[in-house]
Each structure stands twice: as structure tokens, then as C-alpha cells.
Amino acid sequence: IGGKLWDSSLILTAYLAAHPAVVSGKHVIELGSGLGLVGLACASLPAVASVVLTDIDDVVPLLEYNVRLNDLSDKASVKPLWWGTSIQHLFNAPYDVVLLSDVVYDPFGYEPLVASLRDLTSPDTTILMGHRSRHPQEKQFFDSLQLEFTLTSIPLDESSAVWAHPSRMADVKLFSIRKKA
């Protein structure tokens, strides 16, 4: 799955391009980076402090290649991350911003993803999530998430259409998520 470009990553990338202040001066981590579009686009913004792109071990070489190809090694780094593993000592948590794009697709990953978000964030962290509904059980993920985090929908605007045809945006949602104090 790490080798496919998902519509919600296009929408989240467009959102960051239209709202660069969200990551200005911030330390950012992307979970489930896949090809790395969102994290690479974020790292290319002039004012971002740093971006860590993460995915499972098999995807890391592709991410490292894409960071080098885009000449972003000064601001972007790549680390393997299996959601739910003890990670606080491996990462400089909490991060200022966490990026998620089409990561809610496998019910077995729901609880590990929430655990990783818990470990990587503080109440001051902004989580930006692009999502397209794909699985009937994803309500379990959102119910679990909302026990510890608040979720706010971000309206899509015309800036999102620059990156994705409007017909492909119809069922993509953007969320701003924060850990409860």
C-alpha cells in the first residue's frame, strides 16, 4: 500500500500549500508516509523546521530515495515506525504537527495507530488527517480516537481542487485533531 498515491494525500498537500502557517517553525512527523508526498511537500515549505517521514521497514528505502531525489535531506529525515510499538525514546516527541493521510484502512491497525498518536503528541500538537472512508469498521477507530482526542472537520475549499479533480474530492475529509488535556 506504501507505493500508491491516495487522493487524501493530494488534498492534505493542497491544504498545507494553501496554509503554510500551520507548519511554520514547527517540527513535523508524518505517519504512514507511503510515497512521501505530504511529508516532502511539507519539508519543501520554507519556514518548516523539520519533517520526519515514517512507515514500515519495507517502505523506508523508497522514502529515503524520494527525500534525496527532492534534495530535502536538510529538513526531512526518514525513520521506520510500526504503530503501537514503544517509540518515545526513538523520536523527539511530542511533535508540533502530525500528518496522517489515508491511514485508517485496516481494523488491526486502529488501536496501534491511536497508541502511536498518544505517544507522539501533547495537547499542544496539531494532527492533520486526510481521510476517505473505506472500511465499515472505521467507526471503531474514530470512537477510540475521540476518547483521548478532539476531532474537528476542516472544510475543503477551492485550493484543494488544484491537486485533485473535484469528483475525487467528494468523499475525502480533512480533520484537525488535538489531544485532550
Image (cartoon, helix red, strand yellow):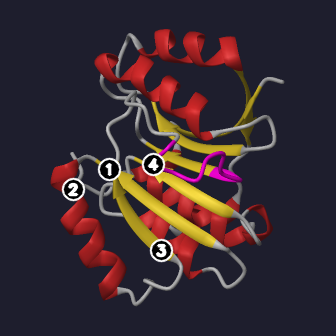
Circle 1 Cα neighbour tier, 10 Å, few/some/many (<14 / 14–19 / ≥20): many
**Side of 34 where 124 appears, left or right:** right
Q: Earlier in the sequence, mark 3 or mark 4?
A: 3
What percent of the width, then of the height, locates residue 155?
73, 44
For label 3, the residue is 76
Q: Amino acid at mark 4?
A: Leu
For label 1, the residue is 55
Single out the residue that lies furthest toward the bottom. 71
Q: Amino acid at mark 2?
A: Val
Residue pictured at 68% horizontal, 49% vertical: 156
Magenta stretch, residue numbers: 89-97
Q: Is residue 81 visible?
A: yes
Residue pictured at 29% horizontal, 67% vertical: 63
The numbered disc on residue 59 is: 2
What percent of the width, then of the height, locates residue 45?
63, 80
Q: Earlier in the sequence, mark 3 or mark 1?
A: 1
Answer whether labels 1 and 4 touch (C-beta < 8 Å). no
